[in-house]
Structures are given as C-alpha cells and as structure tokens.
Amino acid sequence: FEVVYHLQSLDLNHQIAVKAIVHDHEEPILPSAYPVYKGALLQEREVFDLMGIRFANHPDLRRLLLWEGFPGHPLRKDWMGMVEGHTSGLRRFPFEDKAAPDRIMNAGNLVEHGEALSAQSQRNTGASGQGH
C-alpha cells in the first residue's frame, strides 16, 4: 500500500506531497500525521475505515463512514465481497438480501424498478413526450 499526503502552507505558499509505503499487507500500520497536522484526524480515520491501514498514535482511530461491526475494509482488493469477482451494485455486500437491488422504494411503497423509471420519465417529459 501507499499513502500519499498532499500538504499546503497558505502562509508560506508551499506545497508538498509525502508518500509513505506500507510493506505489511496483513497488518498495515503507519505513524499518524495528527501530532503535527491536526487536519489528518478525519482523513486517517477514513483511510482506516475503507482500507484498513492503522495509524500509530492516532487519538481516535475508529470507523468514520461504515458502521461498527462492518466486515473488513471495502476498498481493499482482498475484501471478502470482492474475492469471488466483481459484480455491479450492492450485491457485492455478502450479507445483503439478493432481491433488494431489483426493487426500489418510492413514497413508502416497493415498486418494480422499471415501473418507477417509467412513471418518473412520463412526469418529466409531459404528455407530448417532449422534455421541459
């Protein structure tokens, strides 16, 4: 793994990119940038949540976007939802109802995906079939 920090000083008008390489893919860990750059707090939490890279000495390293108990880190190529091959949509999540992506919620009612699109399309184009 590689983690790239893009840093900028507005006072000095300087920019720098710092690349850190993680060699251990089983237990990836890097030193946290938080002690010198407080803005790294949320960015490092996001990287941990989605990629599974831990940051040593981070004061609050917990999931940011996904819920506690989510299995694994979904942006990793070895994530369990990707090991059998990529499939489109939400079906990559192994614990999800397989029928759910074929139906959508519309005003509290479940409707077939095609029906919802057809009804929305008619409202957008009007009776003449012309767009607004």
Image (cartoon, grey):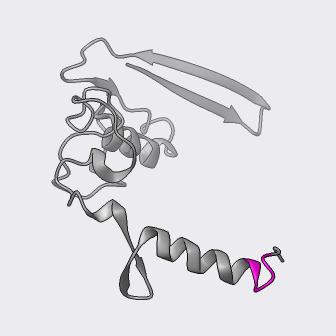
When the figure is inspected, residue 106 is found, relative to residue 30, above or below; the finding is below
The residue that appears at 43% across and 46% down in the rendered structure is: 41
Q: Is residue 45 magenta?
A: no
Residue 2 image position (x, y, % from top left): 43, 19
Who is closer to the viewer here, 72 or 84? Answer: 84
The residue furthest top is: 23
**What secondary structure do most residues of the magenta stretch adopt?**
loop
**Image quarter (top left, top right, bottom left or bottom right) of the C terminus:** bottom right
Instruction: Tell me the magenta residue range.
Output: 125-129
Q: In the depicted view, which residue is nearer to us: 94 or 64?
A: 94
The residue at the point 21 percent across, 40 percent down is 72
**For this rendering, which residue is in front, 57 or 91?**
91
Residue 19 to residue 129: above or below: above
Query: Does the rendering let one see residue 116?
Result: yes
How far across and how far down the image is residue 98, in percent?
A: 22, 57
- What residue lies at 22% left-to-right and 28% top-to-bottom? 83
Q: As drawn, is 37 to the left or to the right of 103? A: right
Number of numbered discs:
0
- The picture places residue 71, in percent across and down from the top left corner, at 17, 45
The answer to whether residue 61 is above or below residue 79 is below
The x, y position of residue 101, in whole percent, is 34, 60
Name the residue located 78 percent from the left edge and 32 percent from the top edge: 12
Q: Quadrant of the N terminus?
A: top left
Residue 3 position by quadrant: top left
Is residue 56 visible to us here? no
In the picture provided, is 116 more to the left or to the right than 22?
right
31 relative to 105, above or below:
above
